[in-house]
Image (cartoon, rainbow, N blue to C red):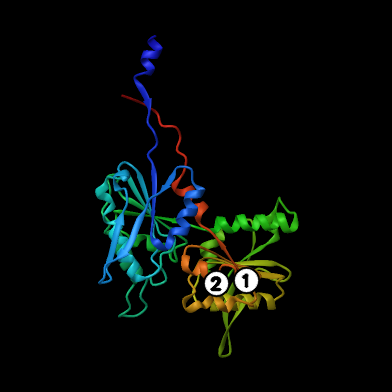
Amino acid sequence: KMQAKASARYFVKPLPRIVLLSAPQATNLAESIVSESKNVTYGKITWDKFPDGFPNIFVHEVEKLKGCHVVFLACFDHSSSIFEQMSVLCSLQQYAPLSIKIVLPFFPVGTMERVDREGEIATARTLARILSTIPPCRGGPMDLVVYDIHALQERFYFGDSLIPVLESAVPLLLRRLERMAATERGVRTGWQKCFSIGFPDEGAFKRYNPLFTEFDTVVCIKVRQGDERKITIKEGMASGRDIVLVDDMIQSGGTLLECGKALKALGANSVSAFCTHGVFPKQAWKKFVGGPFAKVWITDSCPAQAREVAGNAPFEVLTLAPLIANLIDVEAPPPPLARL
């Protein structure tokens, strides 16, 4: 009787719900994240416009956000979409969520992080300041999750109300290469020796080489030959190797294509590429069709471009869903017993 009476004085606190909200451009990725998760539910937002073109936004069932962990999957694919999504992010706090986490897979102005001459505007700092104005919720500063941001020093552009969490999509590539080694070559142990990791420049080498310590590496560099600048190898061997070039993003793709052609000319068995963000302004992805690459892997961090290249060789889209799901849906240890 005493034991039963004592146990009645205790209860196990349930884990707070996790609600995922998303920008309209990121709907497919958000649905994939929910399917990969165990404790995440997908909240509904109606994104509309008034006749004058300004946003008319409605967040459904906001009363259910109270006491929840809210995750907002953002997509700043156009400057106008930033205002729409910031309107939501600056309003969620009034519904008393326990915490707010922002997942912005691609930080779009990351390449404009510094000025080289007077008059240029470092728009990366501007966007960081805009995001830093989001009011904190009762859980304190919010996490801002970004995948493979272009320059690591951009973390210092954000204010104290926002904590940048810099993640990488490289684990997706590693899983893909391991699967290829097993299915195509029957290699399950030491599969890293089946591939060499290449870097299109020294910046990519410094950034990503620590993630590929078990691989042979090849570092490319541009050298001047007369009036031309050509790609050559600074370190490593290309002959007879299956090389995967790694970088954070593809814009026009010019340098990456030059590296692919140079490595093939130097005897590489095959050349592929992995870049987290396929930006491809003005449909630059079409340059890669029929080019030197066996595979070009990108993620769905830029949803419109990912949909556009899907099904076009040599492209293969690796979804960020399992990485994000693991990040927001980590199963916490059982909570301690709490007194009533």
Q: Quadrant of residue 153?
A: bottom left
Nearer-the-camera pick, 5 or 253: 5
Q: Position of residue 101 (x, y in %)?
A: 37, 51
Give the residue pinned by disc 2. Answer: 201
| 339 lies above or below 150 | above
Q: Is residue 90 visible?
A: yes
Residue at the far front in the pictured view: 51
Nearer-the-camera pick, 49 or 83: 49
Quarter of the rendering occupied by the C terminus: top left
Q: Position of residue 267 (x, y in %)?
A: 72, 74
Q: Residue at x 28, y 71 (%)?
A: 53
Nearer-the-camera pick, 273 or 97: 97
Residue at the far bottom in the pictured view: 227
Q: Is residue 129 visible?
A: no
Q: Is residue 181 left or right of residue 259?
A: right
Q: Amino acid at mark 1?
A: Ala
Give the residue pinned by disc 1. Answer: 313
| 166 lies above or below 83 | above
